[in-house]
Image (cartoon, rainbow, N blue to C red):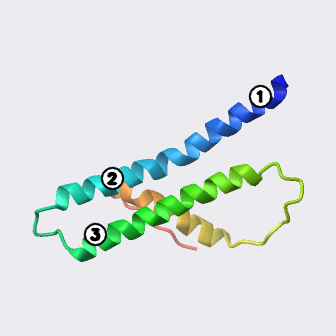
Amino acid sequence: MQGRNAVMGEMINNLAHQWRQPLNSLGLLIQQVQFLHGSAEFSGESIEENIRMSMLLIKHMSRTIDDFRNFFRADKEKITFCVNQVIRQTVSLIEESFKAKSISISFSH
């Protein structure tokens, strides 16, 4: 029982770690809407882009929950995936918080 609780605690810590960056990015997107509201840069397009990025982050966070839920399932099957696509998705999730600090990320394969 103690070993199981330790594993569960570790999984919860890992989930919290995996959610921290997307939550930070989501917060930045919300703050950007508030900052742009009433400015010349405020437009329907900027709102739509923030909504699009927010939904991507939310979907990623949902997939993270599913990944952790399915981690110990014995009946899971192996799948083939594209590493480049996973890297691009990961970069897209964190790039807004990096842009806010004037840091650019480049990816080449």
Residue at 85 percent across and 61 percent down: it is 76
- Kindly identify which residue carries mark 3: 47
As helix, strand or loop, the secondary structure at mark 2 comes to helix
Instruction: Identify the image quadrant of residue 96.
Output: bottom left
As helix, strand or loop, the secondary structure at mark 1 comes to helix
Q: Residues within 10 Å of mark 1 (few under 14, many from 20)?
A: few
Distance of label 3 from label 2 (alpha carbons): 13 Å
Q: Is residue 72 above or below residue 104?
A: above
Disc 3 residue type (three-letter): Ile
Q: Position of residue 80 (x, y in %)?
A: 77, 72
Q: Is residue 108 visible?
A: yes
Distance of label 2 from label 1 (alpha carbons): 34 Å
Instruction: Identify the image quadrant of residue 42.
Output: bottom left
Q: Residues within 10 Å of mark 2 (few under 14, many from 20)?
A: some
Q: Position of residue 65 (x, y in %)?
A: 64, 52
First-in-chain label (3 vs 1)? 1
- Kindly identify which residue carries mark 2: 28
Q: Is residue 43 above or below residue 16?
A: below
Q: Position of residue 8 (x, y in %)?
A: 73, 35
Q: Is residue 102 visible?
A: no
In the picture, which quadrant includes the C terminus? bottom right
- Kindly identify which residue carries mark 1: 5
First-in-chain label (2 vs 1)? 1
Q: Nearer the viewer, mark 2 or mark 1?
A: 1
Q: Residue furthest bottom?
A: 45
Front-lying residue, 82 or 26? 26
| Horizontal side of residue 60 vs 31, given as left or right | right
Residue at 54 percent across and 68 percent down: it is 88
Q: Quick check: marks 3 and 2 in contact, CB under 8 Å?
A: no
Q: Position of residue 12 (x, y in %)?
A: 65, 37
